[in-house]
Amino acid sequence: MSVVIPDGASEKAGLGDELGSEEDLLYEEFRSSGHRFGHPGGGGGEQLAINELISDGSVVYAEALWDHVTMDDQELGFKAGDVIEVVDATNKEWWWGRIMDSEGWFPASFVRLRVNQDEPMEEYLAHLEEAHTGEEDQAGLGLLLGPGLPCKEQMRTNVINEIMSTERDYIKHLKDICEGYIKQCRKRTDMFNEEQLRTIFGNIEDIYRFQRKFLKGLEKKFNKEQPHLSEIGCCFLEHQTDFQIYSEYCNNHPNACVQLSKLMKVNKYVFFFEACRLLQKMIDISLDGFLLTPVQKICKYPLQLAELLKYTNPQHRDYKDVEAALNAMKNVARLINERKRRLENIDKIAQWQSSIEDWEGEDVLSRSSDLIFSGELTKLSQPQAKSQQRMFFLFDHQMVYCKKDLLRRDMLYYKGRMDMDHMEVIDVEDGKEKDFNISVKNALKLRSLAGDEVHLLCAKKPEQKQRWLRAFADERRQVQHDRETGFSLTEVQKKQAMLNACKSHPAGKPKAVTRPYYDFLLRQKHPSLPTALPQQQVFMLAEPKRKTSTFWHNIGRLTPFKK
C-alpha cells in the first residue's frame, strides 16, 4: 500500500523558502481569506449558481479559452475568444451552448465565465463619452446600477477584482501541486524517478516561482480602497518575456497525460495521488485536471485584459499599458495555442500516414508536424513528361503525393515526395511552357534549387491554382516561424503518435482515426452524453425561456460564486 509522509513542523517549506518569508505570509493571508480555485464545470456552488441563473431566465455568457474543433454534429465548434451563451450546465464536463444560430455540446474546461454578464446599454456608454452630457442625465443614468460608482468604473472594478482573485487562487493551486504532489512523489523513490516526475509535472515549479513574483507585483499596484484606479498593465509588460515559460509546459502537457494515464492503470498510484490530495486538503479535482489549469491560465490573460481595456477610459493612466499588455499577452497565448494545436495534429498525421498503402521512406513526422493544404493536381515530371492525376499533401518541409485506387477512391497509394526546403515555386503563365514544350493552363512549377528536378503541376481552375500558390507561401512562413520560435517535436512525441496509429487499426481490421490526447484532455467520451439525453430534454435546452435580470449588474455582490 502507498503511504504519504506528512511533513513535520521542523521541515522547511521547500520552494517557498527561496522567495522569502514576506511572500509566505502573503500566501497564508490569501489562504485564510477563503479563496477557492474557480474551475469551469468543477461542480459545487459555482455550477449550482450558474444553473439557478439559467433556470431563472438569466442569460449566462462564457468566453472560449481556445479553439474547439467540431468533431461531431452535436458538438459546438468555436475559436478562442468567441462568446458562447451557456444554455445548460448541469453536466460537470460538457455544457450545452449557443453561438448565433448554432447549438451543441462543448467542454466546460475550454471556457471561462464572463465577469460582467449584463453589460450596460450601448446608449449609456455613448452618453458617457459625450462631452456635453448634462449632470442630471449622468445622475439619472447612474441609477441604472443603483448607488455607488458610475457604470464603467464599477465594471472596471469588477474586472480588476476578478484578476486579483483568480491570481490568488492560482497561487494556492500551484502551491498544492508543488507541495501536495511533487514533494510527496520525491519521497517515494520506489514509485517515481526524476524523469517520470519531469514528464508528469513539467516545469510547473518554475511557473510557481514566477507567478508568486508576478502576484507580488500586482498586489503593489492594486488599490484596495478604489480598485478601479489600480494600474496593473505595467505588471504584464514587465513580465511579458517571463510568461514564455508556459510554452515549455504546454508542449510537455500531452506527454504528461500519456505518462499519467499509464500510472493510473495501477491501483497503488491511484490511491497514492488521492492520498496526496486529501492530505493537502485540495478541492475535488483529479491530478490530470490540476495539471490542465496552467494551460488554461495562460489563455485567460488576453480575455481578462481585453475586458479590462473595454472598461478603461482612454484618459485613465493605465490605458496605454493595458492596451500594450493585451497585445503582448495575445502574442504569448497565440503562440502557445498554435503549439497546442500542432501537437494535437501529430496524431492525425500519424493516422493519415498509416492509412496510405505502399508507404516508402521515413515517416512524415520525422520532418513535419502540420498539414498546410491538400488537393488533386495533374503532375508532369521530367524526363518522361507523362501526365498523371495525383493527390498532393503539403506539409511543412515536404509535399507527399499519392495515387487514388481505381475502384476504391478513398484508398491512396504512396508515389513520392518533394523536399520543399530545396524547391522554388514558379507561377507559370497560360500558354506554351518552354521546359516541357507543351501548352498549359492554370499551371505552376516546382524546380529544385540545384536544377536537377522539375515538376509541372496543373489545377483545374484558376482559383485552385491561386489557393495552391498561397499554400506554398504559407508553408515557407510556417517553417520560418518555427525556426524563430524554436518549435520542434521530441522523439518521444513522434514515436508515441506512430504507436497510437498502429494500435488503432491492427492488420485485417478497418482503419479508423482516433484522438487519444484530445479524448484524454476532455476526460470523457462525448458521444455518450448527447445520446443519453431524452429528445424532449434536448428540445427544451434549445428553447429556454428568457426574462431580463439585473442580477449580474454587480458581480462583486454575487455571493454564490464565493466560498
Image: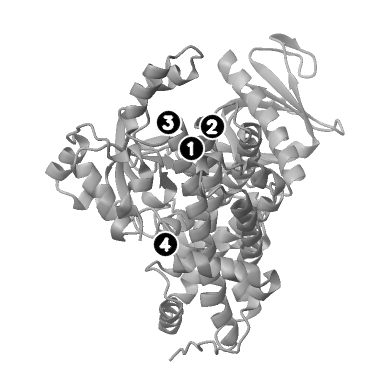
Specify the quadrant that holds the C terminus. Answer: bottom left
Q: Amino acid at mark 1?
A: Arg
Q: Is residue 409 visible?
A: no
Q: CA distance from mark 4 to mark 1?
A: 22 Å
Q: CA distance from mark 3 to mark 1?
A: 10 Å
Q: Secondary structure at mark 4?
A: loop
**Among the two numbered marks 3 and 2 on one chain, the one whose residue lies closer to the N terminus:** 3
**Among the two numbered marks 4 and 3 on one chain, the one whose residue lies closer to the N terminus:** 4
**Which of 217/132 is in front?**
132
Q: Secondary structure at mark 3?
A: loop
* Mark 4, other Cα within 10 Å: few <14 / some 14–19 / many ≥20: many
Q: Quadrant of residue 476?
A: top right
Residue 194 on image: x %, y %: 65, 78
Cβ atoms under marks 4 and 2 closer than 8 Å: no
Q: Amino acid at mark 2?
A: Thr
Q: CA distance from mark 3 to mark 2?
A: 12 Å
Q: Amino acid at mark 4?
A: Arg
Residue tagged 1:
156
Residue tagged 3:
150
> Could you tell me which residue is drawn at 41 percent across and 42 percent down?
115
Q: Secondary structure at mark 2?
A: loop
Cβ atoms under marks 2 and 1 closer than 8 Å: yes
